[in-house]
Image (cartoon, rainbow, N blue to C red):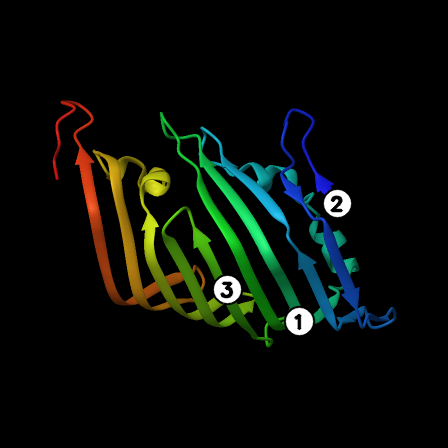
Amino acid sequence: IDVQRAADKVPLLKIPSASITGLSLILPKRNITIGAVEIDSPSLAVTREPDGDLDFQRLFAAPSATNAEVAKSPEWKTRIKLYSIRDGAINFIDQTLASPLPLVATSVEFKLADANHDATGQSQLELSAKVNKRGQLKASGIVKTSPFAADLKLALKEVDLVPLQGWAGNRLNALVTRGAISFDGKVKVDGTPAGVEVQGDGRLTDLNLLDQNSATDLL
């Protein structure tokens, strides 16, 4: 499966192999149960465009529905007992930066057990990946989808900061030319609107900041 916009040379999403097993569909009750969705070696190319939007958000944006249409169409209740990705890859480029560098995640392993798309369901998440040459990411814990909430253990090791600095926007009046972040702790997301609570130990290594106006080193 390849998903590609007409103007792009590289597929946004590429899935060489996928399987769905244990499918159960009950039409009158609008219930879908899937035993397992397993995806092997997918690759995802994500670009943050100059206006700050992610390109795939536009590609997969759902058409808006009127209140009357929503009232007439009850939601489907979906449960996936196991959703897994093996040996995935993600390539991220931030085009809001003058000289963007790629953030590449490889060996992505992802599992989501008992994914239940309603307000009462909670799922067990496990995620690991290599980030660029030296970095590592691991996350595990509980997530809910409606509304979104998460209670995760998060471990980052030597994740490159340079490709991510665009997310700081105008709050950082300096250029990160070198640096990595490590973190070991917990991240909790809850509430409407969502609030984020972070607890743990972090470390910055090999950090270099450049004043964008004077082109001199700040740190």
Labels 1 & 3 near each other (Cβ < 8 A): no
Badge 2 element: loop
Q: Tell me residue 215's x, y (percent).
A: 16, 24
Quadrant of res 37? bottom right
* Alpha carbon separation for disc pair 2 and 3: 23 Å
* Residue, disc 3: 127
Along the polypeptide, which appears first: circle 2 or circle 3?
2
Quadrant of res 33? bottom right
* Residue, disc 1: 82
Determine the residue positioned at 43% across, 37% down.
102
Relative side of 169 to 121, left or right? left
Residue type at mark 1 is: Leu
Residue 207, above or below 218? below
Determine the residue positioned at 23% across, 38% down.
172
Badge 1 element: strand
Determine the residue positioned at 52% across, 39% down.
54
Residue 204, above or below 211? below
Classify 10 Å Cα crowding around label 1: few (below 14), some (14-19), many (20 and above).
some
Q: Which mark is residue 137?
A: none
Along the polypeptide, which appears first: circle 1 or circle 3?
1
Determine the residue positioned at 21% across, 34% down.
174
Q: Tell me residue 149's x, y (percent).
A: 48, 67
Q: Tell me residue 182's x, y (percent).
A: 29, 58
Relative side of 32 to 92, left or right? right
Relative side of 23 to 109, left or right? right
Residue type at mark 2 is: Ile
* Residue, disc 2: 1
